[in-house]
Image (tube, rainbow, N blue to C red):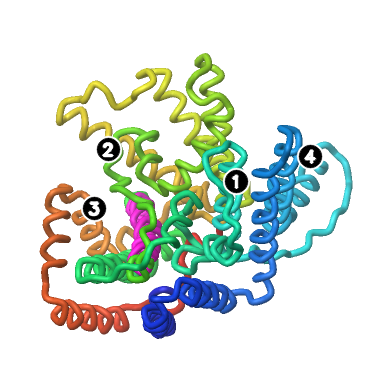
Amino acid sequence: MLFHSATFAVFLLTALTLFWALSPSRRLRTLLLLAASYGFYGTWHLHYLGLIVFSTLLDYVCGLAIAGAPTAGRRKLYLLLSLAGNLGVLGFFKYYDFFIESAVDLAALLGLDISARTLGLVVPVGISFYTFQTLSYTIDIYRGVLRPTRNLIDFALFVSFFPQLVAGPIVRAIEFLPQLELSPRFDRARLHDGLYRIATGLMKKVFIADLLARYLVTPVYEAPGTYGPLIHLLAAYGFCFQIYGDFSGYSDIAIGAARLFGFDLPENFRGPFKARSVRDFWRRWHITLSFWVRDYVYFPLGGSRAGRLRVSFNLILTMVLIGLWHGASLLWIVYGLLNGLAMSIERLVSGASSDAPRPSALGLALRRLATFQFVAATLVLVRAPDQETVVAMLTDFGDVHSVSWKGLAVLAGAILVHYLPEGALAGIESAVKRVPTVAAGVILGLLCGLLALAVVGETPYIYFRF
């Protein structure tokens, strides 16, 4: 069930109507959201609902066991059980085939002839996202910063809340569970804010991401040897804004939809292509993942408190793990490695804080330009289906030096909007939210009509694969 489909619009309106009708009863509204969330996920892979139920029960029990354990050893044992169960399921479905294929290839390089059968597993939608959510719950209980909930229904809803279930933002229990105790509040400001975020997300997905894919990015990546080097460069830039529009659009719709139910989800993007360093980029891109890995991987490794070489190792290992989290392939590993190396070099050259002192306007512009070029270059690894395509995008050029004007127009518009001053963007948002509710509904209806005309077939969100 895609967010930009008529099916989801009907689903969301039905769920909202029932939710607010049942809102006086805490138990009934929670049960309704849980049923809606399971139903939403069931439209993707009904048989994989069992995995969500497994993770839910495992970490619910482990959370209670950790909190009630009489000794530190027992607490650690229950935490390890949670880690092994969750990462074991994630590893089996997402990485089994990759490691089997890699082992066979490595053996062949060593002159060994071994055979091992892959299983052709389909990665369950959103498994990386809800796995990280449930792990943060047991880890926070182990660290003593969170008390476990004894309400299984509340915990099950935390794991499966449908707006952000399959592609984030990654929400932590310490952020979500307390909101279940509050009576939902519905007012004009929240309504307008939710509708604005949904409309923004739909425009990013359909008018930017999907049109860029259709008219610029996909044609070049499918036949790189046909196009000249400038078109290759524009396609690389186009994919930056395609994946940003696709993923941040999903996050906007998730945040907006949750707000209509009375929930506040964390922000996941903050003008990532305005970053002035690679480290700054990762503070602006997929923020909830960056902070999750920082808190649960980078800091436990020692973070920035060790010597320079150790800090560089921590950064590189953390970013390689981020690469692997995204996908089981050599290209994703190289993507993480390059980002880790870049962040380490930045730290070695400019110290612990690469963003201070503040450079001149020209220096800031050059930093942003250099950072964007690095991001665009490394995202080629993300878009390319294999190593051969990466090489072709860098070396295999043809005689065609133009693409559809529609793709170039969308790219120009996306760049213009993205680089508007933050004050201007805030002003536009404020003005739209001040529109009378009836007028806002008419505008949203017109937008939906335009979306129906512009929609490019069945275009799942890119991050559904992760």
- Label 4: state its secondary structure: helix
Q: Are marks 3 and 1 in contact (CB under 8 Å)?
A: no
| Residue 417: x %, y % from top left | 20, 56
Which residue is painted at 33% across and 70% down in the image?
260
Q: CA distance from mark 4 to mark 1?
A: 23 Å
Q: CA distance from mark 3 to mark 1?
A: 28 Å
Is residue 285 visible in the rendered image? The answer is yes
Figure quadrant of residue 8:
bottom left
**Residue 284 drawn in magenta:** no
Q: How many marks?
A: 4
Q: Are marks 2 and 3 in contact (CB under 8 Å)?
A: no
* Residue type, numbered disc 2: Leu
Pointer 3: what residue?
418
Pointer 1: what residue?
324
Which residues lie in the magenta part? 231-257
Q: CA distance from mark 2 to mark 3?
A: 14 Å
Figure quadrant of residue 160:
bottom right
